[in-house]
Amino acid sequence: MAANETLTKAGLKTPSAAAVAGLVFSVLLIAAFVLLRISVPADPQEPGSWLHANSNTVALAINLFPFAGIAFLWFIGVLRDRLGELEDRFFATVFLGSGLLFLSMLFLASAVAGGILIAFVSQPEELIGSSTFHFARATAYAIANIYMIKVASVFMITTSTIAIYTAIMPRWLAILGYGLALPLLFGSAYVDWSFLVFPVWVLFISLSILLEKFRRPDAATPSEAG
């Protein structure tokens, strides 16, 4: 029993675990965002005519979010495990808090969108153009395009800062994280496809970790090296 626990713990500490989780999160979130972007108009004031033609596509996108969220939790957990004793309490709090806030807002926006779909199935004609639809649509839009993206940028800035001081990822990825996070923090509302920046950045991190694992299969993580 003790041997199995040791093997499991060692397996969780491998860089490939974080990489695989990050890849799953990135692919699922990018797919869901693209499906939503091509199915739902960017204008939050539109009357809801997309519900007739694209409700099934939106439902598919919403159902991808929980699996992406689970993968992201795994990604956060393994990155923290790689840090080990190098983890700073201040940055660890902001890192974990912003990650959990991002997931909470992602799930909340998904739940509001799911509620719109359920209401449309029950009363399609009454919902479209109603004040209830506009309220729910505006709420989901604000959560996803204002608050969620800004929290994601805080996660990117914090992760990049941790990476610079602990070298858990290449320095160029940390610098790229700063460069991408600042426009998200201050100008995400002006770029339609800005929500793709965060999962693409996580994808780069995951691919970098996998490449490092293939180049140095026996290399220890920062926490193990100490």
Image: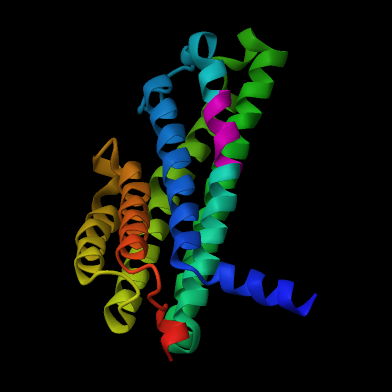
Seen at 30% across and 47% down, the residue is 197
Eyeballing the image, is 215 above or below 65? below
How are the residues colored? rainbow
Residue in the foreground of this view, choosing between 207 and 75: 207
Is 65 part of what is drawn in magenta? yes
Give the magenta range: 59-66
- The answer to whether any part of residue 119 appears in the image is yes
Q: Quadrant of residue 215?
A: bottom left
- The quarter of the picture where the N terminus appears is bottom right
- The answer to whether any part of residue 87 appears in the image is no
Q: Could you say where residue 151 lies in the image, as x and y percent from the top left? A: 42, 59
Seen at 38% across and 48% down, the residue is 199
Is 10 part of what is drawn in magenta? no
Residue in the foreground of this view, choosing between 134 and 151: 151
In the picture provided, is 185 more to the left or to the right than 59? left
Q: Could you say where residue 80 lies in the image, as x and y percent from the top left? A: 50, 74
Q: Could you say where residue 102 lies in the image, as x and y percent from the top left? A: 49, 56
Eyeballing the image, is 20 above or below 123? below
Question: Looking at the magenta stretch, what is its main secondary structure?
Answer: helix
Seen at 24% across and 64% down, the residue is 173
In the picture provided, is 162 more to the left or to the right than 124? left
- The quarter of the picture where the C terminus appears is bottom left
